[in-house]
Image (cartoon, rainbow, N blue to C red):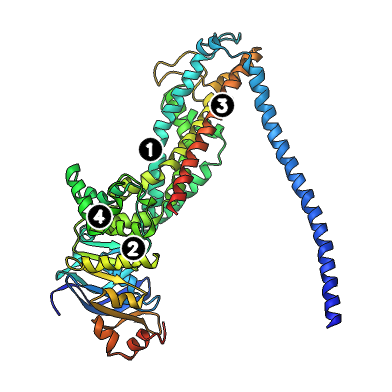
Amino acid sequence: MDERSSEIALIHKAQALNLKKEQRRQSFWVALMWLFGLITVSILILVVGYVLLKGGTAINWEFLTTPPKGGLSGEGGISTTIGTTFYLVGLTLLIATPLGVGAAMFLIEYAGEQSLGSKFLRSMISVANFAVETLAGIPSIIFGLFGYALFVSTLKFGFSLLSAALAGACLVLPTIIRTTEEALLAVPNDYRRGSLALGATKWQTLYRVVLPASTPGIITGIILSVGRVISETAIFFVTLGGSYRMPTSIMDSGRTLALHLYYLAMDTRAFDKAMGTGAVLVVMIILINLLIDFVSRKLTAGVRRVR
Amino acid sequence: MKDTKLETINYSLYYGKFRALKDISIKIPKNKVTALIGPSGCGKSTFLRSFNRMNDLIPGVHTEGSVLIDGEDIFKVDPVALRQNVGMVFQKPNPFPKSIFENIAYGPRVTGLKDHHKLEEIVERSLRSAALWDEVKDNLGKSGLDLSGGQQQRMCIARALAVEPTVILMDEPAASLDPIATLKIEDLIHELSANYTIVIVTHNMQQAGRVADFTAFFLTDESRTGQLVEFNETKTIFTNPRDRRTEDYITGRFG
């Protein structure tokens, strides 16, 4: 008995010693993670802060409301590029949203039952899923080249808002499909069963219950796409052209903010204007991220209530 | 037995190759409460879902034999029309993420009713029938998800009633509720049976004894295929079962 209790005392002592060691080890790793976190945040603040500080001085009402002078001077403001950015975002989403949401609804809600029947359809659907997966990882310039070849030259849309929006739609389509699919999958099957059991058709069930319940998720995908269109350069370089004038139709060329920034930085010596444009871009992206945050918080609030 | 509302004749159901139900023949009387009892996995919920063809939604299911409602083959009826006539209440309350009003009005709306005045009437009548009106009449705009579990389940019953079905299927409607909420649901079932044919799956023997006029006892055989062992008035099943296995189950010797 005595032997046993001294043995236990020894074990306890060893445990206490080990615990001290483990706690030191833990403190080390936690400190390291803090350091990494701080470095990441500092880099972010440095980049954003630098652009905002340097560019901030170039921003004034005149800069925002006058069109660029064009040429190599880099003179003038950015009014038309802001306008073009909004046009392009709007047109791109007008094309991509119905396509993406529709495709996602098919893949999640209907493909399962379609695939029961024919082997051909089943393989088509797995090809479609694989295609969406792959498209999401393709660099934007590839979409640009494709858009140039198809929309700009073959279909003769030229460098235009239309060509750019079609290419941009290809670019953001995977994003919209993926987020919509996830939003649809997050809708409890209880809703679907409940609706069908009340004598609703499948379409009524989708339209009246499933889609409303997945709207916040779908909106998140759309906002992500807005951010993508605003920040991409290469794809629009080869489809939108570079006219600094305000486009008056969808067949006109134009210049988005990001594209203008590229031109300013590469072709002119107007470094302050480039910085100013960059600052406007950064502010826009921050606003969009805040919007995503807000919407997805609403989404999770909804989910929490379901439980 | 009196008027038959629902009937199956040599009904079998397969999940792919697996036979889940075998040769079930039963006549479920009109405007009575019929309980389906039996151990877990004996196929009673699957059998219940046969009456509104919810099994159709499960890939790989096929059936043999026939299922009749008012003497008519349900597989010749459009499933959407059938489900408007045969309502269902699920084990877990499943309100839509909409207001109480919209939850109840959902069925009438999908069947084409648009007149708001008429909808208000239906919502009130359905909530009254489900004994929920007094609790929610001032909060019809509140989300159905904000109700308690028992209230949610009564709302789901009201939602089913709003479509004016003649049959209501209930799949363990009180399984996720506390005893008081359960009692309310049981009272409600009792009241509704005057006008509706109710089929209820329950794990709770006492519940079957309390609410059901008739009871069907299901059991699985060696190959896990569900079978109907005995069907009779609840009193007879509980006091004087014909089959030894029924007696064993009722008295708690297994299950």
B178 to the left or right of A77: left
Ranked by sequence position, the earlier of labels 1 and 3 is 1
Residue toward you, A84 or B228: B228
User: In which quadrant is the C terminus of chain B drawn?
Assistant: bottom left
Mark 4 and mark 3 on one chain:
no
Please state which of the two labelled residues, at mark 4 or mark 2, is closer to the viewer. Answer: 4
* Local SS, label 2: loop
User: In which quadrant is the N terminus of chain B drawn?
Assistant: bottom left
Residues at marks 4 and 2, CA–CA distance in whole angstroms: 18 Å
Question: Where residue A54 appears, x then y in whole percent?
Answer: 67, 18
* Local SS, label 4: helix
**Would you name the residue on which mark 2 appears?**
B90
Residues at marks 1 and 3, CA–CA distance in whole angstroms: 24 Å
Residue A154 can be seen in this image: no
Instruction: Tell me, yes or no, whether the two marked residues, 4 and 2, touch with CB atoms within 8 Å.
Output: no
**Would you name the residue on which mark 4 appears?**
B127
Residues at marks 1 and 4, CA–CA distance in whole angstroms: 39 Å
**Would you name the residue on which mark 1 appears?**
A98
Mark 3 nearby-residue class (10 Å; few <14, some 14–19, many ≥20):
many
Residues at marks 1 and 2, CA–CA distance in whole angstroms: 34 Å
Which chain contains the residue that carries disc 4? B
* Local SS, label 1: helix
Residue toward you, A157 or B96: B96
Please name the amino acid that badge 1 sits on: Pro
User: Residue at image x 51%, y 30%?
Assistant: A229
User: Residue at image x 41%, y 50%?
Assistant: A107
Instruction: Tell me, yes or no, whether the two marked residues, 2 and 3, touch with CB atoms within 8 Å.
Output: no
A140 to the left or right of A271: left
Question: Where residue A280 appears, x then y in whole percent?
Answer: 57, 21
Please name the amino acid that badge 2 sits on: Phe
Residue toward you, A37 or B142: B142
Please name the amino acid that badge 4 sits on: Leu
